[in-house]
Image (cartoon, rainbow, N blue to C red):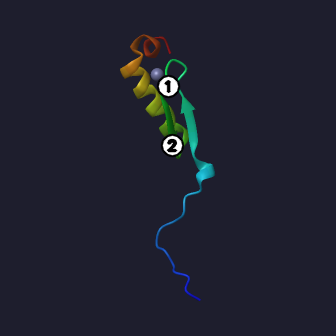
Amino acid sequence: MSAKRRGGYVRSATDAVERECDRCEWRAVADAYPELIERYQDHLREEHPTAWLRS
Ligand SMILES: [Zn+2]
């Protein structure tokens, strides 16, 4: 047997969450929903300030 033990943990791709912007081609992938919301808010603030203010 040549299986090696790895110290790290394996992240499942199915855990990833994804968000697309309604106003442009922007999209993001993150491991957790709160992180994704934060990135989306950052994007809105920078690219669509008016939309960000309204939300
Ligand atoms: Zn956008």
> Residue 52 at x, y = what percent?
44, 16
> Residue 53 at x, y = what percent?
43, 13
> Residue 49 at x, y = what percent?
39, 14
Q: Secondary structure at mark 2?
A: strand
State the residue at coordinates (59%, 52%).
13
State the residue at coordinates (57%, 37%).
18
| Disc 1 residue lies near ligand 1 with CB under 8 A | yes
Residue situated in front as seen by the camera: 10 or 55: 10
Q: Quadrant of residue 39?
A: top left
Q: Quadrant of residue 38?
A: top left
| Residue on which the image places disc 1 | 25
Amino acid under disc 1: Glu
- Whether 3 is drawn above or below 28: the answer is below
> Residue 47 at x, y = what percent?
39, 20
Q: Residues within 10 Å of mark 1 (few under 14, many from 20)?
A: few
Please give the label number shown on residue 3: none
If you read the primary sequence from the N terminus, does the residue marked by circle 2 or circle 1 appear first? 1
Amino acid under disc 2: Ala
| Residue on which the image places disc 2 | 30
